Amino acid sequence: MIQMLVATLMWALVASLLIFRRKRTDRSITRAAFTIAQPATIWRAAALILMIHSALNSLFLRLRSLYEFSRALRRASFAVLNSFLRAP
């Protein structure tokens, strides 16, 4: 959460320096803010991608286990039905 706040503030600083200080020749503060904001944003995006991947993987595993359970239940019900139909 803190890293996202820092990245947001750094991007706001970059934007404000580019808009309000266009005629300045020294761009060291703008470059420093950009250098801090870019990796923080990329790190946050990577963490978000990993979180989404983990959630989708968990959902896939749950759906697969539900599918396997329904197949086993269907096989068991057919076995019980066949045993009733074959009984004399």
Image (tube, grey):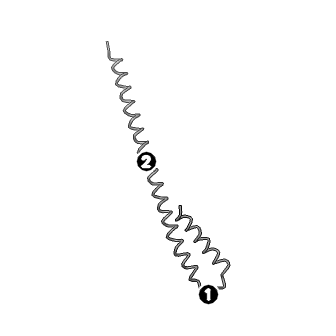
Q: Which numbered marker is on residue 25?
A: 1
**Percent coordinates x, y for residue 11 in the rendering:** 59, 71
Q: Name the residue under label 2.
A: 58
> Amino acid under label 1?
Thr
Q: Which of marks 1 and 2 is nearer the N terminus?
A: 1
The residue positioned 32% from the left and 15% from the top of the image is 87
Q: Quadrant of residue 24?
A: bottom right
Please count the marks in the image.
Answer: 2
Q: Residues within 10 Å of mark 1 (few under 14, many from 20)?
A: few
Point out residue 10 in the picture as x, y percentages from the top left corner: 57, 71
**Which residue does the image show at 59% across and 69% down from the upper left?**
9
- Looking at the rendered structure, the secondary structure element under dot 2 is helix
10 or 25, nearer to the observer: 10
Q: Is residue 56 above or below residue 14?
A: above
Q: Is mark 1 on a helix, strand or loop?
A: loop
Image quadrant containing the C terminus: top left
